[in-house]
Image (spheres, helix red, strand yellow):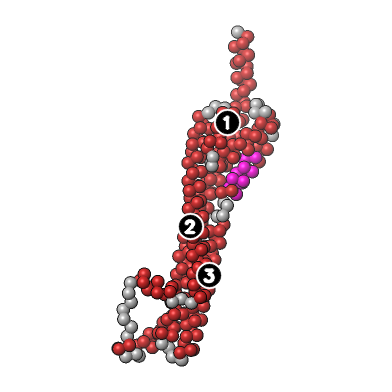
């Protein structure tokens, strides 16, 4: 509302000026933005500098996370194919580290190590609940590692608009100060303050919107990774139980073959 009142005030003031004092048409938008930044005061420049640093940092986080998540998703597919083709857990354990940074590798190692501690890797595990807790622990640790620096995107998305709003408020204050100093509602008196207010508002939105979109997309992919780790943990537990059930039958068949 304050900006609207200032605009109406400027419109009335400029309409009362003679034709000889009419301002020439502005140049292209890019040169106008550069000129506004160049004519900005120290507060507006400080706000723009903070927003620039926040934008660079948020884009660096987003690009690194997209690259890391893409590599993890690719290795997930390769690890699942190798796991389902192999019939022995020991074989997968020997080659599992080749599929890092797949988070499924951490889940597999945690369950496999717990199974080895309980029964030496043979027979039915005496405490299946411990295997489930090991899977949950591995999933939580893997997600925590993948979420590293991701909360910064949410912080930047929420705070960038307020930082831009601070520059907007200070620009309006400068505009009113210019009106009080000049003693009349002239375009020359209020233009610097209004330009600072508008450019800091736009800069805050330019920083906040990409950070918010990136945060939402990355958190959605994290939920997908969490679901895949849960599914793989259950699949691995089923494979261990099925292998343990078939072991007595295999031992009986070997005994019969030796006796015959």
Residue 138 within the magenta-colored segment of the rendering = yes
Image position of 13 with respect to 207: above or below = below
- Which residue is nearer to you in this view: 252 or 38? 38
The tag on residue 163 is 3
Nearest to the observer: residue 22 or residue 75: 22
Q: Can you give x and y, in whole percent of width and height, for residue 260 in the image?
A: 60, 8
Residue denoted by label 1: 94
Residue 2 visible from this viewpoint = no
Q: Residue at coordinates 59% horizontally, 11% vertically from top-left? A: 257
Q: CA distance from mark 3 to mark 2?
A: 18 Å
Looking at the image, tell me whether mark 1 or mark 3 is earlier in sequence order: 1
> Which residues are drawn in magenta?
134-144
Q: Considering depth in this image, is 34 or 90 the residue closer to the camera?
A: 34
Sooner in the amino-acid sequence: mark 3 or mark 2: 2
The quarter holding residue 112 reads top right
Q: Residues within 10 Å of mark 1 (few under 14, many from 20)?
A: few
The mark nearer the N terminus, 2 or 1, is: 2
Query: Which residue extends farthest top?
Result: 260
Number of dots carrying numbers:
3
Label 3 crowd bin: few (<14), some (14–19), many (20+), radius 10 Å:
many
For disc 2, the marked residue is 59
Residues marked 1 and 3 touching at CB (< 8 Å): no
- Contact flag, marks 3 and 2 (Cβ < 8 Å): no
Percent of width and height locating residue 33: 39, 72
Q: Give the percent coordinates (x, y) of residue 3.
A: 45, 79
Residue positioned 53% across, 70% down in the render? 163
């Amino acid at each position: 509302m304050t900006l609207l009142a200032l605009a109406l005030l400027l419109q009335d003031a400029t309409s009362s000026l003679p034709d000889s004092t009419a301002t020439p048409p502005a140049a292209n938008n890019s040169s106008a933005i550069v000129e506004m930044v160049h004519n900005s005061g120290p507060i507006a420049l400080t706000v723009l500098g903070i927003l620039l640093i926040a934008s660079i940092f948020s884009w660096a986080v987003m690009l690194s996370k997209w690259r890391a998540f893409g590599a993890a998703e690719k290795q997930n597919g390769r690890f699942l194919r190798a796991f389902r083709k192999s019939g022995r857990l020991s074989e997968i354990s020997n080659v599992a580290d080749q599929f890092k940074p797949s988070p499924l590798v951490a889940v597999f190692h945690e369950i496999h190590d717990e199974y080895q501690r309980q029964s030496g890797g043979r027979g039915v595990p005496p405490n299946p609940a411990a295997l489930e807790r090991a899977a949950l622990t591995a999933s939580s640790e893997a997600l925590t590692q993948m979420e590293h620096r991701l909360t910064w995107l949410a912080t930047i998305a929420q705070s960038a608009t307020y930082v831009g709003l601070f520059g907007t408020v200070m620009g309006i204050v400068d505009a009113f100060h210019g009106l009080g100093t000049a003693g009349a509602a002239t375009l020359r008196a209020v233009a610097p303050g209004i330009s600072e207010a508008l450019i800091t508002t736009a800069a805050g939105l330019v920083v906040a919107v990409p950070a918010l979109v990136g945060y939402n997309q990355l958190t959605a992919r994290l939920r997908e990774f969490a679901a895949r780790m849960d599914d793989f943990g259950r699949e691995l537990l089923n494979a261990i139980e099925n292998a343990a059930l078939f072991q007595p039958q295999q031992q009986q068949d070997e005994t019969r073959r030796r006796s015959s």
